[in-house]
Amino acid sequence: MDKYINRLLKTLKIEFLASWLIAIVAAVMGQVDIIPNGIVQPHSNAEFKLNTMVIILTVVGVPTSLKLFSLNTTKGLRRMNNDEALRSYHVWSTVRMAVLTADAILGFVAYYLSLNVTGLLCALVAMATTFYCWPVEHKISDYVDRQKMD
């Protein structure tokens, strides 16, 4: 069982680093003007809508991704064997990281399109939340032990 946990741990760490790399690539694309800088006029209706959309996605996406992970990795453990439990843990970890990474990318894109720091702050909130998602062996082991007890 430890072999499977270690393999899952390694996979989750690679996915974590990949999501950070994707977000960094989005930021670099804005810096080198692949994402057009400042095309949304300051103090315009378009800027307001863009910033509102990014704020709502961040305010909803961050807690929802964390809660979805929590709900889906605790609910229904009784009917899963160890392999299914580890697969479920992996799927919901990936979903959580995908939502947070998408929030970060959208924040960076909004920042570079409008050059308003609101998008940058939302991107940084999403990226800072990913530190909470760093995979640790004892969390996965506790999850599998909970599955055995139920």
Image (tube, rainbow, N blue to C red):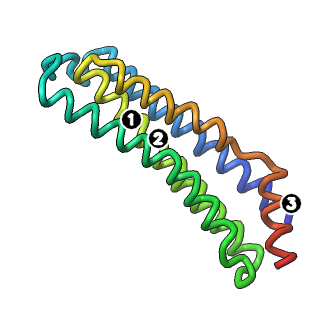
Spatial CA distance of label 2 from label 1 is: 6 Å
| Chain-order first, disc 3 or disc 1 | 3
- Mark 3 or mark 2, earlier in chain: 3
Mark 2 residue type: Thr
Residue furthest out toward the bottom: 79
Q: Position of residue 13 (x, y in %)?
A: 67, 43
Q: Residues within 10 Å of mark 2 (few under 14, many from 20)?
A: many
The vertical placement of 36 against 106, above or below, is above
Residue closer to the observer: 99 or 42 = 42
The residue beneath circle 1 is 105
Mark 3 lies on residue: 2
Q: Residue at x 12, y 29 (%)?
A: 45
**Vertical order, 54 against 43 (above or below):** below
Q: Is residue 76 above or below residue 6?
A: below
Q: Residues within 10 Å of mark 3 (few under 14, many from 20)?
A: few
Q: Where is residue 116 shown, x and y percent of the image?
A: 29, 18
On the image, the x and y values in percent for residue 96 come to 54, 52
- At 64% from the left and 35% from the top, the residue drawn is 131
Instruction: Read off the residue under disc 2.
Output: 101
- Circle nearer the viewer, 3 or 1: 1
- Quarter location, residue 7: bottom right
Dot 1: what SS?
A: helix
Amino acid carrying mark 1 in the image: Ile
Res 18 → quadrant: top right
Total numbered labels: 3
- Please state if 68 lies on the left or on the right of 86 as rendered: left
Q: Indicate the secondary structure of the residue bearing disc 2.
A: helix
Q: Residue at x 57, y 62 (%)?
A: 91
Please say if the residues under marks 2 and 1 sit with CB atoms less than 8 Å apart.
yes
Q: Residue drawn at (58%, 45%), measured in percent from left and top?
A: 15
